[in-house]
Image: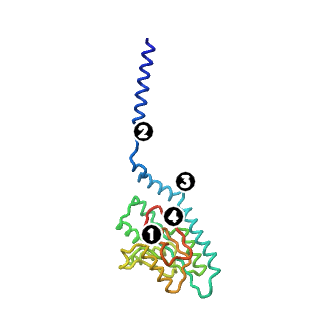
Amino acid sequence: MRYRHASVFLALILSCGMGAVAQAVAPVAPSESIQNLDNVKAQLKAYHDCTKPSVCYQHDLDVQADRAIAFLHRRVPHVSTDEKLALILDIDETTLSNYDEMAGADFAYDSARFNAWVDSAQAPAIAGTLRLYKEAQRLGVAVYFLTGRTESQRAVTEQNLRNAGFDNWQQLILRQTDEESTTALDYKPAARGRIVASGYKIILNVGDQWSDLRGKPLAEYSVKYPDPFYFLK
């Protein structure tokens, strides 16, 4: 009799336990499939800091820069005597890194804070792009910087470029007042058109946004740098 009571009691415990488990595994809301923002920020930091051997921002930048350099080595020997060759480089997250500002702002964009960072002229060079830049100069390819920064930031941008090891470029192209509300996908092709009209053949274009590279006239070869930090149209 005592064992029968014990077995009934055990069955009640198991039954209650199974019921508790069943209630805990409820269907999740559809939005649960969206990654948690804090987890995404942690992934961005891990990618930039190369905390995992197979996930490394610097390595990926170097791979793309090496592809651009390899193209120059293939293309330049075939230049005709009357050709003037040009390389276009975007600035932010292509030539100069703003990671310190982005991480300090917890990856939120604040125009006043970002413009103050630009004015400080302390963004470091992206190493692969500096190698590409120097190789283009050695090979006699004219370098154009084409950036979404505004004309009012010319002096500090030039200073930052020189501080980071870039000098003797062909031209630094910035947004004029009437272009400040224009999307990159409209502004940058128009600027490339003016370069072509001046007699240069754009053989290589390097940027971190698809809007740096798309739109006619296109470069003969375009290289997209990784940028998981922001997206520009």
Q: Are marks 1 and 4 in contact (CB under 8 Å)?
A: no
The three-letter amino acid code for the residue at tag 1 is: Gln
Real-space Cα separation, disc 1 to disc 4, in angstroms: 22 Å
User: Disc 3 on helix, strand or loop?
Assistant: loop
Residue located beneath label 2 in the image: 25
Q: Nearer the viewer, residue 7 or 122?
A: 7
Residue at image location 43% in from the left, 63% down from the top: 230
Q: CA distance from mark 2 to mark 1?
A: 51 Å
Q: Secondary structure at mark 2?
A: loop
State which mark lies toward you, 1 or 4: 4
**What is the x, y in percent for residue 89?**
50, 74
Looking at marks 2 and 3 on the same chain, the residue that comes earlier in the sequence is marked by 2
In whole angstroms, how far apart are the C-alphas of marks 2 and 3? 32 Å
**Residue in the image at 45% along x and 18% along y:** 7
Give the mark nearer the N terminus: 4 vs 3. 3
Mark 2 vs mark 3: in front: 2
Q: Which residue is mark 1?
A: 122
User: Disc 3, disc 1: CB below 8 Å?
Assistant: no
Q: Residues within 10 Å of mark 2 (few under 14, many from 20)?
A: few
* Horizontal relation, residue 178 to residue 63: left or right: left
Q: Mark number for residue 226?
A: 4
Mark 3 → mark 1, Cα distance in angstroms: 28 Å
Q: Earlier in the sequence, mark 3 or mark 1?
A: 3
Residue 177 placement, left or right of 66: left
Q: CA distance from mark 4 to mark 3?
A: 17 Å
In the picture shown, does residue 85 fall above or below 64?
Answer: below
